[in-house]
Every structure is written in structure tokens, then in C-alpha cells.
Image: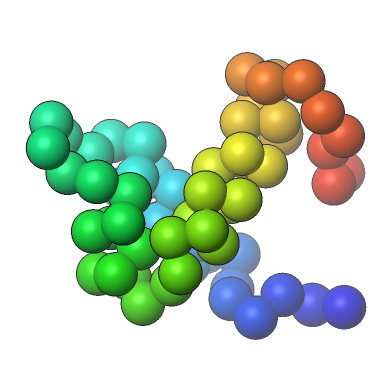
Amino acid sequence: MAGRYPKEFKEDVIRVARDRGPGETLEQIAHDFGVHPVTLSKWLKQADIEDGVRPGMTKG
């Protein structure tokens, strides 16, 4: 099943979240992009797995 959000959109949100400045929360970023904070957390977790930063199953 295809995701609700396009791959490029997810990549942009993840990039902004990873590059956030001090005092900028994931909740703020999620709100700015119109996604739920839990969704953003899941995307970041999976991105870390895909990038080899964290152990887990890749979607490959």
C-alpha cells in the first residue's frame, strides 16, 4: 500500500527536522508541515535505520 505522503515530501520534512535549530521542537516542525508529531517521529526513526545510524529492518 502506498503511503499517504509523497516520498519527496517526507524527505523534506526529515531534512528540516534533522537540521532544526536550538529551541525548535519536532512538534513545531510537524505542525508547520501539517503532520502528526508521532508520524514525524516514526519517519525519523525509519530514516535513521535506512541510513545505518540505528539498528533495525530497512524497507529496502
Q: Residue at x 63, y 18 (%)?
A: 53
Which image quadrant is residue 20 in?
top left
Residue 33 percent across, percent down from the top left:
33, 71
Which image quadrant is residue 50 in?
top right
Residue 23 lies left or right of residue 19; in this view the side is: left
Which image quadrant is residue 58 in?
top right
The relative height of residue 20 versus residue 42 in the rendered view (above or below) is above
| Residue closer to the observer: 8 or 43 | 43
| Residue closer to the observer: 41 or 14 | 41
The relative height of residue 42 versus residue 3 in the rendered view (above or below) is above
Residue 18 percent across, percent down from the top left:
36, 36
Residue 26 percent across, percent down from the top left:
33, 49
Which quadrant of the rendered structure holds the N terminus?
A: bottom right
Q: Which residue is drawn at 46% across and 69% down?
A: 36
Residue 35 lies left or right of residue 2; in this view the side is: left
Asked whether the viewer can see residue 11, the reply is: no
Residue 7 percent across, percent down from the top left:
60, 64
| Residue closer to the observer: 55 or 16 | 55
